[in-house]
Image (spheres, coloured by chain):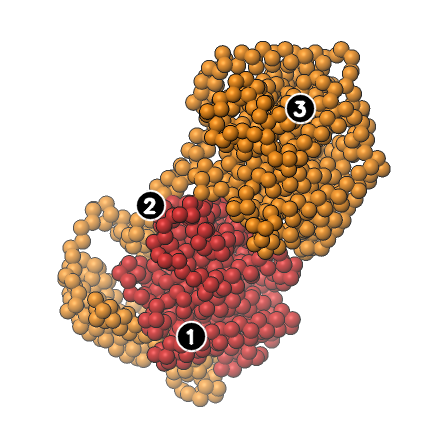
Chain colours: A orange, B red
Amino acid sequence: MLTSVLLPFIAALFIPLISKWKEKVHTGIFVTLIPLAVFIYFIQFIGAGFEPVTREYSWIPSMNMNILFHLDGLSLLFLLLISGIGTLVAFYSIYYLHTSEQLGQFYVFFLLFMGSMLGVVLSDNVYVLYTFWEFTSLSSFLLIGFWNHRERSRYGALKSMLITVFGGLSLLGGLIFMQVITGTASIQGMIEQQELILNHEYFPMILTFLLLGAFTKSAQFPFHIWLPDAMEAPTPVSAYLHSATMVKAGLFLIARFSPMLTGSEWFFLFVSGFGIITLCWGSYMAVRQTDLKAILAFSTISQLGMIMAMLGFGTDMAIFAAVFHILNHATFKGSLFMVAGIVDHETGTRDIRNLGGLMTFLPITATLAVIASFSMAGVPLPFLNGFYSKELFFDASIHFNEGAQGAVAIMQSILPYLAVIGSIFTFVYSMYFFFGTFRGESNMDKLPKKPHEAPIGMLVAPAVLVLGVIVIGLFPELINQPFISHAADSIKAGDIDKSISFWHGIKLPLIMSLAVLAFGTILALSRPKWQGVYRILPGKLSLNSFYDGTVKRTETYSTAITNGYMNGSLARYVRLIIGAIIIVTFSIMAITGSFTISNEDLSALTAPEIFIALTMVIAAVGTIITNNRIAAILILGVVGYGLAILFVLYRAPDLALTQLIIETVTVALFLLAFYHMPQLEKKTETKRKKSLNLTIAIGFGALMSMIGISAHSSKAFDSISDYFLKTSHSLGGGDNVVNVILVDMRGLDTVLEITVLGIAAFAIYGLVRLRRHKDEEG
Amino acid sequence: MSNLAILPILIPFIAGILLAFLNKHIPLVRSLAKIITVAQLLFVSWLCYLVYQSGSIILETGAWKAPYGIIIVADSLAMTLVLTTNIVAVACVFFAPVSLTEKQERFYFYPFFFLLITGVSGAFLTGDLFNLFVFFEVLLMASYGLIVLGNGKVQLRESLKYVLINVFSSMLFVTTIAFLYAIVGTVNMAQIAQRVQEVDQAGILTVIGILFFFVFATKAAIFPLYYWLPNPYIVPNPVVSALFGALLTKVGIYAILRTFTLIFVHDPNLTHTLFIYLAALTMIFGVIGALSTHNIKLIVAYNIIPAVGFMLMGIGLFTETSISGTLYYLVHDMIIKGSLFLIVGAIAYVAGTSDLRKMGGLIHHYPVLGWMLFIASLVLAGIPPFSGFIGKLLLLQGGVAQEELLIVITGLITSLLILFSMIRIFVKGFWGEKSDVLPTKPVKTAPFTWPIAFLLTFSVLLGLGAEWVYPSVQSMAEYLMNPDLYIESILKE
């Protein structure tokens, strides 16, 4: 099982090699074999006696991250969709993509996606699932940006990435919460402890996190906006990722966690609510589009909404219908995308306003299109699978668990109406798609190319899918028992009524279907007359401009904020830094109440000390005030010499000596350097700034003094210096303790400090020499 | 006690001095530098293995016994960081000849480089607070030497700010050591920890702890002290930027990690809670900075800051899981920051500009560079299965377990924005028309590529192969959360 997931990744490594011969053999031919192999491997699990299989492979066991695969009915359904449609799409792409394209890259991304998607639906470990989940987003990003010389393509890729990765991170948040609460990283393990999560105080947040992940991935309103822009990807990609598989990962996630979450009212309200809104909004917006792929994109959004809503209903019938529709949608929508690709390929345009009457030129394509689009519309014919799931959807929307109250009851009562409204528009855009492209008058002169039927190879894949539509339509029981019912079981254990039949008798769902048919036909025929409604809704309300605005604002506000404080002024940086230190440290001091003064072991002050200290203070202030550079240095020298005298007074002659030498050398050096320096400018700072500087300076001085005093007053231990005094002679061989400390006891410090001086010397030498080199050159 | 502990400091120290006198013979210096760093890496790996196997190696310098003399403590944390430092050093030394001019090489790039490594390794290894200050001086002085290398006007302006802020923080550092010494009467870190413990970290010690935090936070670039960082980091040569980005702020974070898991651990409700808030602010403001600019080098430089926020978050949460997260993130970040600075340096070199608005379509000319940037961006943003994810996951788990929701959500949002800030470089710089005219002639990128690929390999391995590393990280976190282990290993009797 692990091999089947790794196979695409391993194959991806070899694609760059194989694609070197792309002029001779189309790389797609090799690639087709891989999903086919995976498909053949997984198809063997199908059967009435299927039991879930669990496999564990070691990855990072110490972090609870093992590759734990759980193959149940739900994953099997998805696995077969991913590998089955993957085979068809790869085959289709052989004819769609010319060998002059960068086939190597395309197929690497394609395989990366496929492997990750297989991983998503198999993983039981939440972190492994998340890993694959992000990789589907990334490979989708790369595939949308495949034709990255187009501006729209780059835009669409970035948009899809930002929205889906946003959802991904949110999902990660939710998963971490659940893992920390339950102590297990296995989804099945979490489901077993569902009470713990449902009753946890953070449950609403966990649910929000999970739903954000699912809704962004499955393009639910209002996050659907990335999907239409993702249509910039090559059509095989749209058919595969953005209709049949990746966008269903969100549905998969909800289905996966359903056993845990269906008990919650919030789950019902949010999932059904957002689902049904997405259904209505997507189908409504689809009718407005003029690009064939855009119609299909909004149609996908709306269909995903419908499945999402059913998962939210949570009743037996709804779950069954949802699973059934996941399969049906993949068949008819996959084929419709390929049809759109053929039309684009053969006529050079996808603009429905320029198309029309293509039935005569592309009869086979048109036949495929009519079946697929009528199935999508849910036309009641016994050989269209779309009708069955639509009928089940209606049925589910009027059969809820009894006894609901409050918001849940209100929601239950409006759902059937919204279901019908959404389906009416679904009917309208399905007709619009087919009739607008294949019927009506042809405008040959508007087409970039002279249309003719597609090559056989290109027709094979959609034909297989349409065949699926018909077979499922005619013999729904064929896939029911061995396949679909297992998937439904794994979402909701129990006795699900699993019969599918065309004729239920004249009941409410049938009446709903007929209503859709009637109103749909009227609206489809009168479409041009009510197109004006789009000027009112959405009118200027656009989620896209909201997204664009947010991205733009993120950048402009960031720039504004950052430039607001990062103005390059050192003085300001220092003010901010010292200001922060003052505020925080004073607060800590106040909280801990740690300011203490004790004069226990202090000697009495003497007059010379006071005199020297005062002189130093005055000199220090003087340095700041003066505008003359020489004066400033000389006054600073006073501070230094004052310190030296203090050292003398405190009986530290060696320190005093050092201080004197340093002070003298420094002043001398400064005076030497003055010759080369510009005049000191008079500082022109505002009064406000000056007083701010003063406050900060005094504040910092006060802070350091207070800490110094407190530190001295809270002496708690004897210093280790006694040891140095004792051992200086016996171990260090010297009577001058300071010397012994410098060269022996802490000799390492001294060596390193000498090194510091050495480095400084080399740095300055380098600086001077490089400058001279430059001058010579210049 | 064993002299082995000081060799990771001594080898680059001697190398630095030696090469300073050979500066006229550039080919010789180059090959010597390469040989020494590689040999050093091998030696340090072995030493690291030894420490993992049989515990800390401690050296009492000059045979002055602890707590009186300076001691070098090669414990698992220090050795792990020294090892990572040497990995980055190898990449940089191989990148240097392609990126530097001969003059820059001649005017002591290599001596400064080795002394920087000396300072950084010493800071990780020392068990003495004053000695830590001295190693900080060594690494800072070497960094001053590196930052002015090349002697451009902008460079001198920015390096002046860098030097002044660091001089200020050094002054504060040494003053704070004096305060602490006044109370506990020692500079040996183990003994300080022991004594602070004995008086249960009386209030003034907490205040002093916070001062230490500010000293290190200035170096680590934590909110609100990071203003000095971004610009000085992008003016020098890319290889210098890589060294700075990979090593310097991390020394600051290491010092916070060490002091606030060993010494100032008795009032976490005050100190460590403060860190959590600062971590959140650091992440947000850092990533906002990264989004504010079109200069690719600046984007990477700003991205240092949110990473520091993540590491501080783990220290603030102060649990075994979160500390493991910080450790993992620390190692990961040293490597990825090194490679990112090299990558953007290479991009700026081949594109002839670091302004993103003037780039486009580079992928058609430099596919390898583009894909390395793409992967590095994913690593940085913490996308699995790369190294950034493991650290981030541990930190977030720690945050959730401590119910610190604010920081968890901030961390998640920051990850998205980091990815956005980096992927912009890929989308705007690398995607686009093939025909986009390049300002410079096509350049052979292989010499650039190998050092970067070398570093990225570690990023991938630290993610996919986390099982090889994580148990050690976990036991390191356990060790850090029990300061007595450190104290006892040094003050045995």
Name the chain under label 1: B
The residue tagged with tag 1: helix, strand or loop? helix
Which label belongs to residue A680? none
Q: Residues within 10 Å of mark 3 (few under 14, many from 20)?
A: many
Q: What residue do we see at 68% from left, 51% from top? A: A7
Q: Residue beneath label 1, please? A: B30
Q: Are marks 1 and 2 in contact (CB under 8 Å)?
A: no
Which label belongs to residue A563? 2
Residue A479, compared with residue A732, is above or below; it is: above
Q: Are marks 3 and 1 in contact (CB under 8 Å)?
A: no
The residue tagged with tag 3: helix, strand or loop? helix
In the rendered structure, the answer to whether residue A161 lies left or right of residue A563 reads: right
Q: Residues within 10 Å of mark 2 (few under 14, many from 20)?
A: some
Q: Residue beneath label 3, please? A: A371
Q: Both on one chain, marks 1 and 2?
A: no
In the rendered structure, the answer to whether residue A208 lies left or right of residue A55 reads: left
Q: Cα distance, mark 3 to mark 2?
A: 60 Å
In this view of the protein, which residue sits in the foreground, A431 or A746?
A: A431
The residue tagged with tag 2: helix, strand or loop? helix
Name the chain under label 2: A
